[in-house]
Amino acid sequence: QMLFPLIARRAFNAAVPLRLLSSKPPPPVGSARAWLADNDVVAERLPLRNARRVVVKVGTAVVSNPDGTLALSRMGALVEQLRDLMKEGRQVLLVSSGAVGLGRLRLGLAKDVVANPANVIDRQACAAAGQGILMSTYDMMFQRLGITCAQVLITQGDFLSRERYSYLTDTLDRLTSLGVIPIINENDVVTGCSELDTQRIFSDNDKLSALVAAGADADGLALLTDVEAVFTKPPDQPGAERIKVFTAKHEVIIGEKSTMGRGGMSSKIAAARVAASGGVHTVVASGFDVSNIKLIFSGEDIGTLFPAAPRPNKRQRWLTYATTTTGMLTVRTSAKEKILSAELNSNVLIADIISVEGNFDARAVVSVRDQDGVEFARGMVQTKSEDITAQLSPEGVVTFSSAHAVMTSHDIVVLEGI
């Protein structure tokens, strides 16, 4: 039974028919046979077909019409697609933009006024008015399908603090284990501008979805946008080609970004690379045809795939992506070799340090650079900057005081190869 017969019919009449990858019933998600079931799925897409926990991100252009009203038919179809993923045995998280645009319409403010970075308070007021509209619409739609959803509003500080980061990811784990779909958005009422957040971990919901996917140990991320994939140049330009699998060698000419959202194609590429580096197979695809969600997690060759790297542990992911550095340590070549060798006792000692930049306290996250000024690691220090500086040994001589560990191997993450 359709969720909204009148509005959903319009969405599905235009949808691409879904085809089964095999005439046999598909194996359960997560089973060994799911990796080997079909020759139709290219090897690079098999992890998406087998993904147990998935994140879907939809932008303002997907949930809203050009005039700022809710795209109800698309939202209804989106909710049904997420319901179908849950029926396959998957855990689903949704990252949804759209609150600012909806609030702007409700408050009667002009689009160019809200889009102006100088009008921070107007944007926050729009977020306050629009978030309730967005969430109540999702809640009503999911309830009609017998699914419970939960609002999760995130600020920059939830990532900067290791403890709050752990509480956030543990809460998401618990919600999904209860069969609930968390609906995640940045809390733009109290965050979202450089004036309020001097330490910015994410600047839009694209990066937020990547951080959530990596932090929540998701297997797949679908970044749904207003174009069909990542192209070598804007798709309306002659010679534009779809990039099927994105690699570091690809060069992309970026077009204009979203008018009401803060993201654009460059934002989505950067976010997809963060998620992939965090061990999450990521696809950038069109959200105007929400049947793409089913196709992505069936292993179909649509959109642009960002293959996942080996998954770092949660502490490494937090240090690498969910923090900002407040200072810098320049270390000797011998110290760099020790850190890169991943020895069990690769602590950074005061004797290993040449210089200190910035003022920071103990337990701050700092950058670690070599003598050429290249950042190759970052980590959490055990000593504040002024105490380190006071004990520096010009020649790197190990004394009683210079043998003190400024940074333990457990608190260091190497950036090369992650």
Image: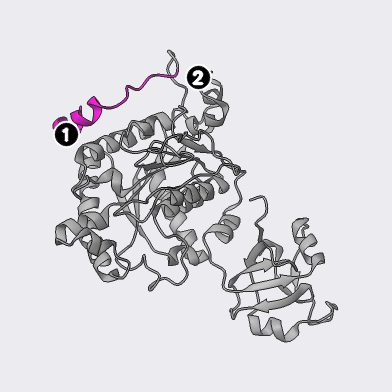
Residue beneath the point at 50% across and 35% down: 243
Q: Let me know if residue 277 is in the magenta part.
A: no
Give the colour scheme shown. one colour
From mark 2 to mark 1, how far is it between C-alphas? 33 Å
Q: Are marks 2 and 1 in contact (CB under 8 Å)?
A: no
Dot 2 or dot 1: first in sequence order is 1
Disc 1 element: helix
Residue 338 horizontal side relative to residue 387, left or right? right
Residue 159 horizontal side relative to residue 407, left or right? left
Which region of the structure is painted magenta?
A: 1-21
Residue beneath the point at 46% across and 50% down: 266
Residue beneath the point at 29% across and 43% down: 62
How far across and down, in percent of the image, does residue 89 sit? 41, 32
How far across and down, in percent of the image, does residue 151 sit? 31, 54
Quick one: quadrant of the N terminus?
top left
Going by the picture, which residue comes out furthest to the front? 238
Q: Amino acid at mark 1?
A: Ile
How far across and down, in percent of the image, does residue 80 sit? 28, 34
Residue beneath the point at 76% across and 82% down: 392
Disc 2 element: loop
Task: Establish if 408 lies above or below 344.
Answer: below
Q: Which residue is mark 2?
A: 40
- Specify few, some or many for label 1: CA neighbours under 10 Å numbering under 14, 14-19, or 20 or more: some
Q: Quadrant of residue 291?
A: top left
**Which of the two residues, 371 or 186, is positioned nearer the viewer here?**
371
Q: Amino acid at mark 2?
A: Asp
Residue 175 horizontal side relative to residue 253, left or right? left
Q: Quadrant of residue 147?
A: top left
Q: Let me know if residue 18 is in the magenta part.
A: yes
Q: Which residue is mark 1?
A: 7
Q: Tell me, yes or no, if residue 170 can be seen here.
A: no
Task: Establish if 314 lies above or below 299.
Answer: below
